[in-house]
Image (cartoon, rainbow, N blue to C red):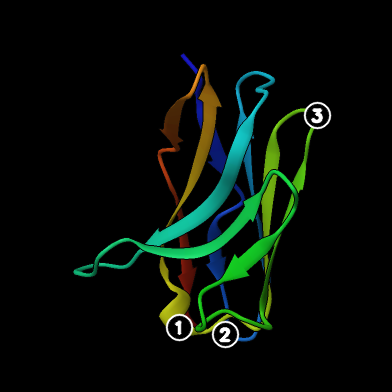
């Protein structure tokens, strides 16, 4: 069973930066995408950034120009560099990995890491 583990969350002041990491427990082939989601208290989980196998990226409008998603293939690791953080970025951030085997897609989610932006 593949496990996905996030790290790098914490408390940061408005305007500060954090770098989140997400690593899969084993090397995985045929990755479709890796992505970061977030969920604030009382809100639905939302997509923050996504990176595909071909390294195509996309971002939520609220984080464009401030967040950058990147990945390493070996091992399967994805990063989220978050700059110019705002209080509204406060949320639990989740990593998601999707890959396919034999025409079937599999989704794996991490446990989440808390990001709190506050003075």
Q: Is residue 67 left or right of residue 61?
A: right
Nearer to me, 37 or 107? 107
Of the image marks 2 and 1, the number of the one nearer the N terminus? 2
* Relative image position of residue 96 (x, y in whole percent): 48, 43
In the image, 81 versus 7, the foreground residue is 81
In this figure, which residue is indicated by the disc labeled 1?
Answer: 87
| Mark 3 element type | loop
The outermost residue toward the left is 42
Kindly indicate the quadrant of the structure image that contains residue 40.
bottom left
Q: Residue at x 71, y 59 (%)?
A: 56
Question: How busy is the neighbourhood of tag 1: few (under 14 within 10 Å), some, or many (20 plus)?
Answer: some
Q: Is residue 98 above or below residue 29?
A: below
In the rendered image, residue 24, in percent from the top left (x then y), is placed at 61, 28
Whichever of labels 3 and 1 marks the residue nearer the N terminus, that label is 3
Q: Residue at x 48, y 23 (%)?
A: 103
Q: CA distance from mark 2 to mark 1?
A: 6 Å
Disc marking residue 74: 3
């Amino acid at each position: 069973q593949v496990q996905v583990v996030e790290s790098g969350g914490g408390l940061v002041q408005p305007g500060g930066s954090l770098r989140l990491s997400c690593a899969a427990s084993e090397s995985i082939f045929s990755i479709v995408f890796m992505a970061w989601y977030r969920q604030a208290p009382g809100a639905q989980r939302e997509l923050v950034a996504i990176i595909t196998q071909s390294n195509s990226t996309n971002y939520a409008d609220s984080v464009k120009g401030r967040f950058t998603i990147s990945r390493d293939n070996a091992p399967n690791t994805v990063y989220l560099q978050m700059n110019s953080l705002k209080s509204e970025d406060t949320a639990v951030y989740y990593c998601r990995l999707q890959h396919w085997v034999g025409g079937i897609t599999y989704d794996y989610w991490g446990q989440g890491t808390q990001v709190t932006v506050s003075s």
